[in-house]
Image (tube, rainbow, N blue to C red):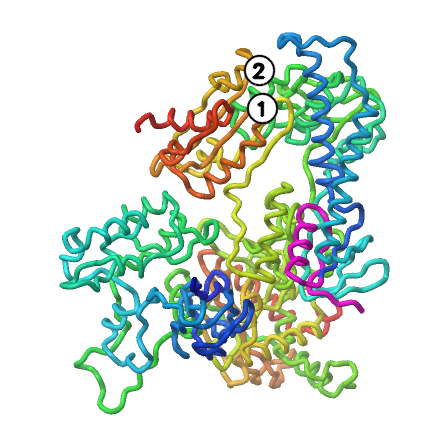
Amino acid sequence: METYDLIVVGSGPGGYVAAERAGALGKKVLLIEKGFLGGVCTNWGCIPTKSLLHSAKQYKHALEGEKFGLEAQSVSYNLGTAMAWKQDTVETLRGGIGFLMKAANVQTLFGEAIFVDAHTVRVEGKEYKADFMIVATGSSPFVPPIPGSTMDHVLTSDEILSVEKLPESLVVIGGGVIGVEFASYFSMIGTKVTVIEMMDEILPMVDGDFAKMMRREMKDVDFKLGCKVEEITSEGVLYTDAKGKKQSLASSLVLMSVGRRPNVAGLENLKLDMGRGGVLVNDRLQTNVANVYAIGDVNGKSLLAHSASRMAEVAISNIFGSTKQRMRYNAIPWAVYSAPEAAGCGITERDAEKQGIAIKSKTVQMRSNGRFLAEHGKRAGGLVKVIASSDTNVILGVHLLGPYSSEMIWGAAAIIEAELRVQDVKEIVFPHPSVSELIKDACFALDHTL
Amino acid sequence: MAQQVVMPKQGNTVESCIIVEWNVKVGDQVAVGDILCSAETDKSTIDVESTAEGTVLALLFAEGDEAPVMESIAVIGEAGEKVEASAPADPKPSEVKEEAATEAKKAIPVVSDSPATQSAAGSSPRARALASSLGIPLSSLSATGPKGRIIERDVKSASSEPLTPAAIQAALAQGILAPKVGSGMGGRVLAGDLQKEQPASAPATAPVSPSAATVPEGTVTEIPVRGVRKVTARRMMESIHGTCQLTLHAFADATAMKRLRSGFKASNSELGLTNVTLNDLILFAVSRTLTQFPAFNAHFLGDKILRFSSVHLGMATDAPRGLLVPVIRDSQSLSLKAISVEVKRLVAKCKDGTATPEELSGSTFTVSNVGSFGIEAFTPVLNVPEVAILGVGTIVPKPVEAKDGSISFVPHIGLSLTMDHQAVDGADAARFLKALMENIASIDLLLAL
């Protein structure tokens, strides 16, 4: 039987990073994947959606470019070409991960892994042993048991990425990040989109003012808030609205994006302690079985690709390197790549209220910024909010809505990790003109003194 | 540049480790991952690996010394490099006999007695400038300059990984000396790391020692309280002070248990049952009874009670270094034989000191068995935050009156259930104990389920 220093099950941004880091340390590593290298992120998540969203933004720009002096005739969107571009991107990145694994001397094995015990996995009848195991099996879209939810025209984020025909209408159930991104994409390319959200606001990780502006900016999308889907039929969706009235919506396609569930099949023999979100781990990503670590979506701590990659590094460090590293969750940025983009890092005002943290907060409008105004005009919406502790001035949260948000937000992560205070950020020089200057402006709005 | 190797953190409860043996000496070449020393935590023995490559320049603790976690224990660098005196002045083992109060003062830099050193006048301008940029309160430093002045060297010796701006502000405002390594990026000290330790303002409390008037005649041996003893002492006091303990005693008919035990003993050794003990049977019965009484498979946390679906059974174990409580995980789903095998494995690891912190934590209910010493009943102390603990006594014959009025002696095993009256009531405990008595009395039936 083959024995390894480490076996990693799942090759998403958690698993492949773990395998690569361990391989680079000279460890003998086996990476097991049941689908494609790269997991959901590369194949059905982050990457393909970015490809499609970018193509739609280009299209929309061409359509609305007249006010900037851009006059284009007979502009059209070719879904087939966009899908081909997306597929090429996915396959190139997938190949890149394969190359990375080779370069780090990581052995890859394709097949479904079943854990036999804490040191052994079985893949297609053959057993493999290792001193350490990393469970990086990810998560899958959750399909709630609503009548009709198994019909052919009800898709999850996995299947909707392969639609071949532009749907005339789309109902998105669930207004979280995934729902909002797909709503944004399909509305930009001409589909009539309705988002049905059970809560009274979309995007649970932002404060109300941001969610409201996001809805306003996504003017082609119809948002139904506080509504509960009762049944899906071949013609559309039946739901109860916020006032308790039965309503119906005709739709040729339905996207189910109400959440994700950890993939825990095959782990039964490990007898791992499980919590509501997934496998329970400590801040070193170790499970109750000492040599088994669980990273990424499967532990439910933070369902983001970059969280998984950081967890991979922390786990590998604790297994093969310094045991000093701990996973910190207070400065993990997130981004929504819709039009407009949104991104954030740290706490919201609502979080602060819930946790009883005394804060002060300032929100500035993006149109007060030179670059934003030059590129988007006076009417476009955009916000930057900075939240700081009212006792210590330490910056606890930064939230952005508008262009480049996803590219700027790492700065907020650095600010929060470094525990910089409002007065510290005021001393940083930001490039001009750039939308990022608004972060500094918000800090001055919090404290005008020099 | 010389690098310091710190005593690694071992779980959340371990505050310090005793250096058992150094594997290297000053002048030796070491690589990253080489074992520098073995150290004893309160629960197990660990190997401390080098996190740096080079020549061992200094070992900052002697064998037998207690090194706080995340504190530097060795300095590694290039041969001939000068070592910064950044380690705390640690008392040599031979000097420990001194008055306890002075010892405590030497071990950690505490507020100097001289008021002069606390004012700016008692420090050099260079020291003041460095201290304020590093976030080190002057009041937390020991002065080594002329006439008790704090000089730059004193500030440097107290410096640590960089403090974040917020941590500098908090350290200076609250007069707290920052830990050497924090929990932020690359070990940066965050504001939150300061709240945990406050050596600067904490008074040096002298360990309990008899006053002069009551010192008995003759030789006195002083034994420092540390390791397992220290943890046990602390946890027992926490338990007694923080809970409302009530113990119920009962005796369960042990006839079936004894019969089974004889059967196991005489069984074909290939079945692997010859070593199944009475204690294993009790643990089995407890694991099954607890699933019917979730209120007792729980933790009481003051504002909430956590009930667990899995029974992780703690088992008080008399190890050479003191009381250890290894944990049989998911005991409710283990067969009697599997429980027996796991118990033997854990006890062996406790006896030779190789049990890992993971194997010694996470229990949801604890069993303490002193039956082999002939104890009939006792009042076990709760393993907080658990809601209950079962004490198991010896087997004694009890007179039992049959229906026809005849008296016979039936073997009974003593059961003492201590429960936290904050979390459960006496009647609940009585019901649980009664069910356990019945399950033990008909353990052969329980095994068939």
Which residue is the extreme one toward the bottom?
Answer: B218
Mark 2 crowdedness (10 Å alpha carbons): few <14, some 14-19, many ≥20: some
Q: Nearer the viewer, residue B416 or B243?
A: B243
Instruction: Tell me: B158 left or right of B300.
Output: left
Residue B324, visible in the rendered structure: no
Mark 1 crowdedness (10 Å alpha carbons): few <14, some 14-19, many ≥20: many
Residue A376, label in figure: 2
Residue A432: x percent and y percent?
47, 24
Q: Quadrant of the C terminus of chain B?
A: bottom right
Residue B340, visible in the rendered structure: yes
Q: Secondary structure at mark 1?
A: loop
Q: Which residue is mark 1?
A: A403
Q: Tell whether label 2 touches label 1 (CB within 8 Å).
A: yes
Q: Which residues are magenta?
A: A1-28
Q: Chain of mark 1?
A: A
**Residue beneath the point at 47% across and 74% down:** B40
**Residue beneath the point at 81% across and 20% down:** A78
Type of the residue with mark 1 = Pro
Residue A127: x percent and y percent?
81, 64
Whether residue A215 appears in magenta in the rendering, the answer is no
Q: Nearer the viewer, residue A77 or A154?
A: A77
Q: Nearer the viewer, residue B218 or B165?
A: B165
Q: Chain of mark 2?
A: A
